[in-house]
Image (cartoon, helix red, strand yellow):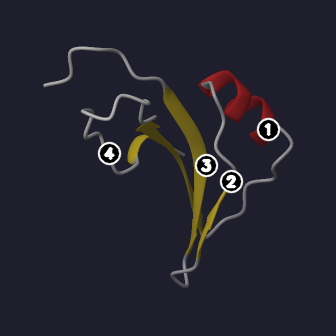
Amino acid sequence: MHKHKHGSVYRAKIASHDGRVEYSEWFNTEDDLRDSMRGTQRNIGKRYYCEVKMVPCLDPACDVDEKPRVISTL
């Protein structure tokens, strides 16, 4: 278990009905991601996800290698 705090980063994941997946850049806050997606027109046939992952720290003993996980879906 981690004894120190890590930051988190957020990105959008857009999955098309044909299996293609697009990713946004990583953002420092959910609000930044939400603001970047505000102008995005949602299309039928696509699913929109918000993913989060922990940011690794500089501690050499830290072994964080978290995969992104979905925290919300549209």
Q: Residue at x 63, y 28 (%)?
A: 28
Give the numbered dot on residue 24: 2
**Mark 1–mark 2 distance (CA, rounded to whole Å):** 9 Å
Q: Earlier in the sequence, mark 1 or mark 2?
A: 2
Q: Would residue 67 be found to the left or right of residue 3 on screen? A: right
Tell me which numbered mark, 3 or 2, is placed earlier along the sequence.
3
Observer-side mark, 4 or 1, equals 4
Tell me if mark 3 has few (under 14), some (14-19) or many (20+) residues whose alpha carbon lies within 10 angstroms of its own.
Answer: many
Question: Label 1 is placed on what type of residue?
Answer: Ser
Q: Looking at the image, is 40 positioned above or below residue 57? A: below
Amino acid type, residue under disc 3 in the picture: Ala
User: Mark 4 and mark 2: span between their CA atoms?
Assistant: 18 Å
Question: For residue 36, which numbered disc appears in the image?
Answer: 1
Circles 1 and 3: CB atoms closer than 8 Å: yes
Structural distance between the alpha carbons of marks 1 and 3? 9 Å
| Amino acid type, mark 2 | Ser
Q: Which mark is residue 66?
A: 4
Residue sitting nearer the eye, 56 or 14: 56
Residue 9's mark?
A: none
Secondary structure of the residue carrying numbered label 2: loop
Nearest the eye: 3 or 38: 3
Q: Secondary structure at mark 4?
A: loop
